[in-house]
Amino acid sequence: MSARRTKFYLDKQNGKFMGVCAGIADYTGIDVVWVRVAMFLSFFIIGWTLLAYFAIGVIADNRPSGLYADRDDEKFWQGVRANPARSTRDVRSKFRDIDRRLADIETYYTSRNTRLAEEIDSLR
């Protein structure tokens, strides 16, 4: 897949005008309604927001179709974009836990457990 899942894309399918707010919502995982409200309020508070909105709309790429496999995949990549260090730490933690559990199983099955040996022999 040539499309990067950690890149910002315009979401014209879910967007109202140019897809900038929908793209921000997709990128951050925030509900698009709140992004639109924040953008609307910032138009009045900060003068250059409208210029930035159009610049993003012109410069950013459109979101490729099939970027995510399903909703869980989308949520995962939004979490990665929000905090990549946490995502890496979570994956490492899961692998350490799996490794520890496999080591416990290996220790249990290779130990001198007579009860286990008797159960295995009774199955033969």
Image (spheres, rainbow, N blue to C red):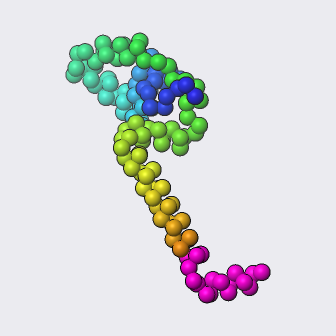
Q: Position of residue 59 (x, y in %)?
A: 40, 14
Magenta: main secondary structure: helix
Residue 59 makes an appearance in the image: yes
User: Left or right: where does residue 99 sit relative to residue 109?
Assistant: left
Return the residue nearer the eye: 27 or 34.
27
Q: Position of residue 83 (x, y in %)?
A: 36, 41
Q: Which stretch is magenta?
A: 108-124
User: Left or right: where does residue 73 sit relative to residue 87?
Assistant: right
The image quadrant that residue 120 belongs to is bottom right
For image coordinates 58% across by 28% down, the residue present is 1
For image coordinates 30% across by 12% down, the residue present is 51
Question: Is 112 contained in the magenta span?
Answer: yes
Question: Is 55 contained in the magenta span?
Answer: no
For image coordinates 41% across by 46% down, the residue present is 88
Q: Where is residue 66 in the image (x, y as percent from the top left)?
A: 59, 29
User: Left or right: where does residue 115 sit relative to residue 3?
Assistant: right
Q: Is residue 62 above or below residue 67?
A: above
For image coordinates 53% across by 26% down, the residue present is 3
- The C terminus lies in quadrant: bottom right
Q: Is residue 71 above or below residue 96?
A: above
Residue 15 makes an appearance in the image: no
Return the residue nearer the eye: 63 or 13.
63
Q: Where is residue 117 in the image (x, y as percent from the top left)?
A: 65, 83
